[in-house]
Image: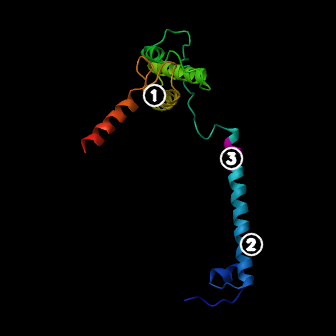
Amino acid sequence: MAREVTEHGASGYRRGCKCEVCREGHRVQVARWRASRREREFAKALADASGTPLVETPAPEPVAAAGALDMDAAPGPLEAALIEDITEPDSRVAFRRHLVGLARLNARVLDQVSRLDRYDLISPVQLRQLEILNRIARIGFAGLDDDATAGGTVEVPDDASALLAELEGGE
């Protein structure tokens, strides 16, 4: 139940009148209140700035330098295994030296993770390493042909045709 408004302006707005005059009076009163609040806060901030700081911050402890990847170290177990497995990429493949270099670098990082104290690198570097190894496996290596025998002849199609002839002859 709204009270009767006898005077329009800020007091009329407080009593429930929402006419243009009352809304404007309310807007002006709120703007004055906000300006005076900002002035009080600014004066308080100036007084605090001349004295002690508002918040005591402790001096940070010195940060230990992160270890660096030792590029001159002997290959670790993963890098040594990679070097043994990947000796001669196929010369027809683009970026072969680059891919092998990336694989060696990732293997070196994985070998030195514990020394670097960066266990957070294990999962992303492993994923990247697997992607590189999959790509290297697709491109192949000189002398590596899964379908050829040591003599260079392909056995799988011959075996398949012999099996097919056997099945046709048996019917």
> Do the numbered discs 3 and 1 sit on residues whose CB atoms are within 8 Å?
no
Instruction: Kindly identify the residue that appears in the image at 38 percent across and 30 percent down.
Output: 158
Q: Which mark is residue 45?
A: 3
| Stretch of the chain drawn in magenta | 44-48
- Amino acid carrying mark 3 in the image: Ala
Q: Is residue 147 above or below residue 41?
A: above
Instruction: Kindly identify the residue that appears in the image at 38 percent across and 26 percent down.
Output: 155
Residue 162 coordinates in the image, percent (x, y): 33, 33
Q: Earlier in the sequence, mark 1 or mark 2?
A: 2
- Amino acid carrying mark 2 in the image: Val
Q: Is residue 32 left or right of residue 142?
A: right
Instruction: Kindly identify the residue that appears in the image at 70 percent across and 63 percent down.
Output: 34
Q: Secondary structure at mark 3?
A: helix
Q: Is residue 6 above or below residue 85?
A: below
> Circle 2: is it few (<14), some (14-19), or many (20+) Cα within 10 Å?
some
Q: Is residue 61 above or below residue 166?
A: above
- Residue 62 in view of the camera: no
Q: Which residue is mark 2?
A: 28
Q: Secondary structure at mark 1?
A: helix
Q: Which residue is mark 1?
A: 122
Q: Disc 1 vs disc 2: which is toward the camera?
A: 1
- Residue 142 in view of the camera: yes
* Closer to the camera in the image, 124 or 66: 124
Q: Which mark is residue 70?
A: none
Q: Is residue 125 left or right of residue 17?
A: left
- Amino acid carrying mark 1 in the image: Ile
Quarter of the rendering containing residue 68: top right
